[in-house]
Amino acid sequence: MESKASPTDLKREKNHHAATAGGRAAGAYKNVNNLYNQERFHAAQGHGFAAEQANDLADQLHGKKVHKGLGDDNAKDGPDRMVNGQWIQAKYYKDGARAIDACFRDNGKGALRYYDQNNEPMRIEVPNDDVIYNKAVERMEAKIKNGQVEGVTDPAKAKEIVQRGGCTYRQARNIAKAGNIDSLKFDATNGAVVAASAFGVSAIVTFATGIWNGDTPQVAAKRAACCGIKVGGTSFVVAVLSSQLLKAGLNSAMVAGTESIAAVLGPRACAIIINAFRSGAPIYGAAAMKSAAKLFRGNAVVAALTVVVCSSFDVADIVRGRISAGQLVKNLASTITTVGAGSAGWVGGAALGTMIMPGVGSIVGGLIGSMSGGVAAGALTNKVVGHFIKDDAEEMQHIIQKQVEAMCVDNLMNNDEVKELVNGLSGKLSGSKLKDMYVSKDRERFVEKMAAPLLDEILAKRPKIKGNIDDEIEQGLISLLNELAEKGESVEDTGASEEDC
């Protein structure tokens, strides 16, 4: 059993880096966009932006077609949301009458401000509180009676124009803050959407490369599901933690640093980067630099949390004695470079893809950039760090090799039996099993116990020797001596080898 990695193992490791980097980057892309949009929660009317996003998310989960980012262009009297083609203006006021007054010119005394693409009154979305909604409908009825809504004369139409939002006023305010149930539910729902995207990318890449490398569909699917769950789970945890930290004010501490980075890059580079990530009309100049700084803050938080979450399993293992300090350093270095290079690769690839083919090019370019960057960084780090730190797995495989050699000699095993034993052990040697072996006080005994059932099964297949062995050997000796006596030859003259005699 060779302790050195085979070409197939190296190819699998490379594919694992690609699938992991691609899935993490896809999740990070969505997480960063969410954080970018949620920075508005800190504004004076932050709960209104929170309500818009919460209602978008609820409609999306109910299978409705949601057009995101409408409010980002700050178009005068434009819609905040669009669902199934319907333009919606969100007004999350504590007082329903004030919410409707805000939709009319001259502090509520003039004409309605909001009309859709068909010149029909936009839907006015108010909090899902009975008192607030009822007051809003009453005020809209009064406006219609006063002739302030062009093209509408029937007060009963007020119930069509005013609609309930998906959350209450209190829930909207809670969503914009950290550390409460409503906020956590919103972030967890967002995290589930992010995790699904990360799972899909990593699972598809793992499945495809597995098939191309000769795996059966069943084995490839199992590997794909395992990789997808790990990457998707990480993205989910990062989504919740990053959003909660942002709402708690972490972004405020990073403003100066990220704006300095944007200043170094300049307005042109910032415009290329930010327009690859945001929806709506492209932005340039100072606006692009400010938006790019917000994007960098999100990227920094998501990348840092991804490293922390991924490394937490290694930290738990070293506490339990399942890996060495050197292995922890090696794993941490690989995680940092893979995450960093994957994130940078997505930004660069998305920007380049947007320049070539806006829209689809952003996603395709980002995915290719993240996978190639993650693979290259992971391979380089392992190569460099590997010169100084030996893998725990390599050390364990060396012990296994020595024990297998001893078993083969002790049990007089032939080539086919040795191959069967090695293949059986290979199927049992997962990363978790090697960590259990590392923490074992008697690693040689650990290998013996792991191999014992396989060895018993192999030896049980040997043909049974029937009859009296001593009698058989005695008859063989008599037969040989008779032949020699008849021919007048010695044992050497018969040409029998040591294996025959």
Image (cartoon, rainbow, N blue to C red):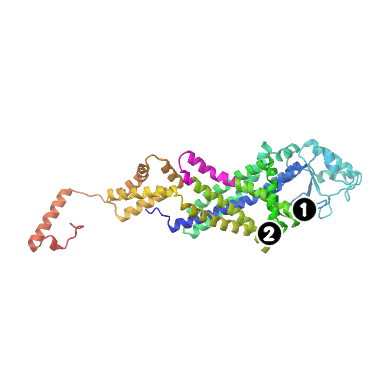
Q: Characterize the magenta stretch by its predominant secondary structure.
A: helix
The dot on residue 73 is 1
Residue 369 at x, y = what percent? 60, 58
Q: Magenta region: which residues?
A: 305-327
Residue 109 position by quadrant: top right
Judge whether residue 314 is colored magenta. Answer: yes
**Nearer to me, 119 or 495:** 495
**Nearer to me, 256 or 249:** 256
How busy is the neighbourhood of tag 1: few (under 14 within 10 Å), some, or many (20 plus)? some
Seen at 50% across and 51% down, the residue is: 222
Amino acid marked by disc 1: Asp
Q: Which is closer to the viewer, label 1 or label 2?
A: 1
Seen at 66% across and 41% down, the residue is: 245
- 184 lies left or right of 95: left
Q: Which residue is mark 2?
A: 359
How busy is the neighbourhood of tag 2: few (under 14 within 10 Å), some, or many (20 plus)? some
Judge whether residue 3 is colored magenta. Answer: no
- Secondary structure under tag 1 reads helix
Residue 4 at x, y = what percent? 41, 54
